[in-house]
Amino acid sequence: MSERRIPLAEPSLEGNVGRYLQECVETNFVSSVGPFVQRFEEELAAKVGARFAVACSTGTAALHVAMRLAGVDSGDDVIVPTMTFIASANPVLYERAAVTLVDIEPRTWNLDPLLVVEELDRRARRGLRQPKAIEVVHVLGHPVDIDPIVVACERHGVFLIEDGAEALGATYREGRFAGKHVGTLGRVGCFSFNGNKIVTSGGGGMIVTDDEALARRAKHLTTQARLPRVEYMHDEVGYNYRLTNVAAAIGVAQLEKLDDFVARKRRIAARYDDALGDVAGIGLAARASFADPTFWLYTITVDPERFGCDATTLRLHLAQRGIEARPIWTPLHRMPMYAGASRLGGHVADAVYERALSLPSSVTLSEPDQRFVIETLIARGTR
Ligand SMILES: *Cc1c(COP(=O)(O)O)cnc(C)c1O
């Protein structure tokens, strides 16, 4: 066993984290009241170019509130990609609505926009009820091909939610959304600051929107739907989804590092691209020309015939040498809660699931460590 340990994605607390935490202690603002929460909201909104941001306790909480903002209720369905982290879909079930799972496209590994557009048009032609919302997920730091979806949502009056949990810092390069940040093209966008994300607040989430009424309602729902000025009067069922001042303090300091972290992730991706581009049976991380992805987790595909072993064998080979690699999420339609869900499209997600492997992508990954990952990986292949 090697002494070296190279994690998949660990946080880096460089910068002002310590200073801001000290400030929380000195001012005695450690809980849900304190100046860092508002500062985090304002700075995140400015960073992504949204008018409003509402802090939440987790990214999952942010998505749950998004479902409430969309009015998702029992009897409704919400379109969600079948290949994503489970937290993208569960909030639909929290509201007792149904999930309609859509396959992904090979170019970006994000939901296939043509399938979504076709489905909305088909339902309109037949006079069927439209989904209450479409939730796109910008997986692994790569923006969704969102333009056709925005158009279709406008045409059919469907509420568009963006799960940007893995893609903070990712933008569009081409088309009418050139320069725009993920999370700002739907009615609401959600982000996560969990420990493995590109920036962390220890744990946390954020809802962004340009719609003031939605922002106000999001704040209301995250704070137990308590009415101001009246003693403990609540006008609907809300949640305690607030972010603490301590978490927000970490978040503010991390946000100051975001541009630097994105640049580092892109350099790591460029090195993997260079080193693995010619390796037989290895497919490079998905990338479409319309986007500037962050490569939050650099994820390859392994063709067992051409490479010499499958993704699982390669993962175990790397693990024996202290290198943490990770399979991609099991497609949702293979899980008991979603096995009965309606589905759109084919089996691209299943094919990607069989072959995908995420490689170490921490912003702290050193060049020698990355070289070690690359050499260890190549050594297991046929050439
Ligand atoms: C991490 C993640 C979430 C949930 O965020 P938490 O802060 O962990 O609740 C939601 N969606 C996706 C795609 C994620 O990767």
Image (cartoon, rainbow, N blue to C red):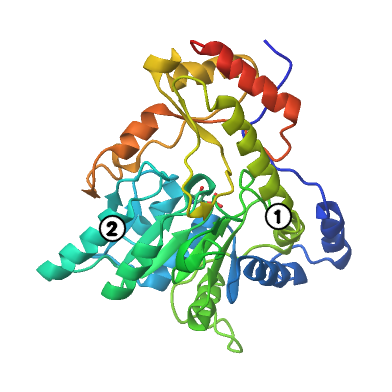
Q: Quadrant of the N terminus?
A: top right
Helix, strand or loop at disc 1? helix
| Ligand 1 contact, mark 2 (Cβ < 8 Å) | no
Helix, strand or loop at disc 2? helix
* Residue in view at x 68 percent, y 72 percent: 42
**In the figure, 95 relative to 238: above or below?**
above
Q: Is residue 301 visible?
A: yes
Amino acid, disc 2 = Val
Q: Is residue 335 visible?
A: no
Relative placement, left or right, of 322 versus 310 is right
Residue for badge 2: 116
Relative placement, left or right, of 335 versus 143 is left
Relative placement, left or right, of 93 versus 232 is left
Tell which circle, 2 or 1, labels the residue nearer the N-terminal end: 2
Residue for badge 1: 259
Mark 2 Cα shell of 10 Å, populated few (<14), some (14-19), many (≥20): many
**In the figure, 382 relative to 49: above or below?**
above
Q: Quadrant of residue 132?
A: bottom left
* Residue in view at x 12 percent, y 71 percent: 127
**Which numbered dot is residue 320?**
none
Mark 1 Cα shell of 10 Å, populated few (<14), some (14-19), many (≥20): few
